[in-house]
Amino acid sequence: MHENKPELSVVIPAYNEESRLGQTLAPMWRALNRRFSSFEMIVVDDGSSDDTAGVVERFAAGHPQVRLLRCAVNRGKGHAVRRGVLASRGCYVLFCDADQSTPMREVRKLLKGLEAHDVAIGSRAIRQARIVECQPFYRVLMGKVFNKIVQLAAVPGILDTQCGFKCFRGDRGRDLFSRCRIDGFSFDVELLFVARSLQLSVVEIGVLWKNNPESKVHPVRHSLQMLRDLVRIRCYGLLGHYPPIGALRVRTEA
């Protein structure tokens, strides 16, 4: 391994996450420090109006593995994750949510999956997943309906496209994100759609997950936005903005 290349890059998108990051940055750092000889944490402030940037800067002052990227205006989670991944240097790159709904220790499962695959995605929908606290019934129902539409229109065979815990071989991840365009919450679907077009193998892995009742995803407004973006993804594919579609190889494992 190149001495200047960290073993793992962790990208954390953040929009008005002053409170959450104040509670989760230290536990994330400790979990990574226990498990990896070298790593970096990249927090992307997506145009926050609170003190998100200040919280990260103060923590980074005593933790050289942490760096902050700032967006002048709010562009969306997809844009924030894309910017962070493209700025990463790790042999592997993971993106996860600031609320740590899936704890950092679960990254080892995804890295094991990458021994035989190009992309490893956390899943709440397969049998091996462990759900500590469920979402409200209406969110579960809407999520299942959206996933059925996604499977029909874009990425058949993947049971959970939206879990915010995904890992890639570093160069593969940076190449994938360099091709993506969606700035909103549907960026996960686009990412997997592009992976299929590149004929990359994707493994879906059950992870521990705990619902955060303060989720920023609005069940109606963002669902409509995601459906609109799904149409955009299909149009981009048909117009040749992505590479030609190949076969997607998907399997599930614990």
Image (cartoon, rainbow, N blue to C red):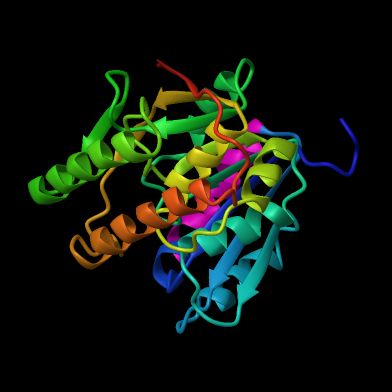
Q: With 50 as the anchor, is 144 left or right in this view?
A: left
Work out which residue is located at the far right of the displayed protein and give it. 3
Quadrant of res 60: bottom right
Taking the spot 27% from the left edge, 53% from the top edge, the residue there is: 212
- Compared across the picture, whether 243 is left or right of 97 comes to right
Quarter holding the C terminus is top left
x, y percent for residue 19: 40, 69
Name the one closer to the observer, 64 or 217.
217
Q: Is residue 33 magenta?
A: yes
Q: Nearer the viewer, residue 139 or 221?
A: 221
Q: Dominant secondary structure of the magenta stretch?
A: helix
* In the image: residue 86, left or right of residue 248: right
Residue at 59% in and 61% down: 43
Residue 167, quarter of the rendered image: top right
Residue at the outermost front position:
239
Q: Name the spot of residue 75 as percent of width and height, x first.
A: 50, 73
| Image spot of residue 137 (x, y percent) | 9, 45
| Residue 134 in sight | no
Question: Which stretch is magenta?
Answer: 22-35
Q: Quadrant of residue 18?
A: bottom left
